[in-house]
Image: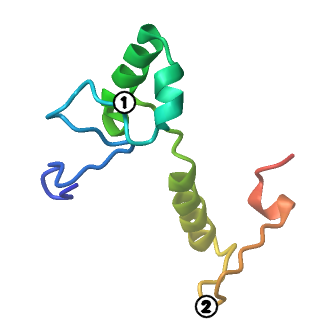
């Protein structure tokens, strides 16, 4: 994403599919399993494969909050930026738990 404009510069999703052959077996499914599927199961699998997960599926922003928590800890002098990979929070100091 371009931080100045918000334009999407690149996007990727997996599993991928071949738009030139939209009804072919997806690459992540074994051929034996594909042959065992009913036509309804195959259709459902193909439709779920075509869905752009990067845009349509919700994701929990768990890792984003690590940055926010670390920033707050640094701002409140609860963490030392000179100590590599160490972050300990005293329950009383942080106030997250009561």
Q: Which residue is mark 1?
A: 49
- Give residue 75's quadrant in the image: bottom right
Q: Circle 2 — which element?
A: loop
Q: Earlier in the sequence, mark 2 or mark 1?
A: 1
Task: State the residue in front, 48 or 96.
Answer: 48
Q: Nearer the viewer, residue 47 or 32?
A: 32
Foreground pick, 1 / 33: 33
- Position of residue 12 relative to residue 30, above or below, is below
Kindly report which numbered mark, 2 or 1, lies closer to the viewer in this rendering.
1
Residue 95 position, x and y percent, is 77, 54
* Callout 2 crowding tier (Cα within 10 Å): few <14, some 14–19, many ≥20: few
| Quadrant the N terminus occupies | bottom left
Percent position of residue 59, x then y = 49, 38
Q: Which residue lies most toward the top here?
A: 40
Residue 79, position as x, y percentages in the image: 67, 76
- Indicate which disc residue 82 carries: 2
């Amino acid at each position: 994403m371009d931080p100045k404009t918000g334009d999407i510069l690149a996007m990727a999703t997996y599993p991928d599919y071949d738009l030139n052959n939209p009804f072919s077996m997806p690459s992540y499914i074994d051929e034996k399993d594909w042959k065992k599927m009913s036509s309804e199961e195959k259709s459902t699998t193909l439709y779920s494969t075509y869905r752009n997960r990067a845009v349509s599926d919700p994701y929990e922003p768990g890792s984003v909050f690590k940055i926010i928590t670390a920033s707050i800890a640094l701002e409140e002098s609860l963490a030392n930026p000179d100590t590599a990979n160490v972050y300990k929070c005293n329950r009383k100091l942080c106030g997250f738990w009561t």
